[in-house]
Amino acid sequence: MPRGERPRCPFCGSTETELFSLFGQQLLTAQYYCNRCHTPFEYIKGDDVLEDAKAKLTSSEE
């Protein structure tokens, strides 16, 4: 996934997703939530996941 792009929902293909949890069922996955089809899904962690977590933390502090 290119930097700045959201993970694509495997169920509907939407990029209207948000980080739900840094930890999924496996240590190498994070949980995301699709705002279009309202389905949680797991995504393999990378630098992009850490950027999402930092942005979410920063926005919750404001």
Image (tube, rainbow, N blue to C red):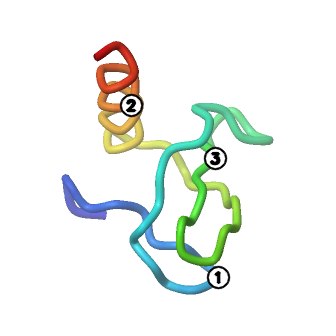
Pair 1/2: label in front: 2
- Sequence-earlier tag: 2 or 3: 3
Amino acid found under the numbered disc labelled 1: Phe
Per the model, the C-alpha gap separating discs 1 and 3 is: 14 Å
Pair 2/3: label in front: 2
Q: Residue 32, percent across and down?
A: 58, 52
Report the residue marked by disc 3: 31
**Numbered tag placed on residue 11 in the rendering:** 1
Q: Quadrant of the N terminus?
A: bottom left
Question: Residue at point 30% right, 34% down?
Answer: 51
Tell me if mark 3 has few (under 14), some (14-19) or many (20+) residues whose alpha carbon lies within 10 angstroms of its own.
some
Q: Residue 50, percent across and down?
A: 38, 32
Report the residue marked by disc 2: 56
Amino acid found under the numbered disc labelled 3: Gln
| Residue 61 picture quarter | top left
Tell me if mark 1 has few (under 14), some (14-19) or many (20+) residues whose alpha carbon lies within 10 angstroms of its own.
few
Q: Residue 16, percent across and down?
A: 42, 68
Question: What element does badge 1 sit on?
Answer: loop
**Numbered tag placed on residue 21 in the rendering:** none
Mark 3 and mark 1 in contact (Cβ < 8 Å)?
no
- Looking at the image, residue 27 sits to the left or right of residue 6; the answer is right
| Residue 5 picture quarter | bottom left
Tell which of 58 and 10 is nearer to you.
58
Judge whether 22 appears above or below 16 on screen. Answer: above
- Looking at the image, residue 41 sits to the left or right of residue 48; the answer is right
Q: Residue furthest top?
A: 61
- Sequence-earlier tag: 1 or 3: 1
Tell me if mark 2 has few (under 14), some (14-19) or many (20+) residues whose alpha carbon lies within 10 angstroms of its own.
some
Question: Residue at point 49% right, 84% down?
Answer: 13
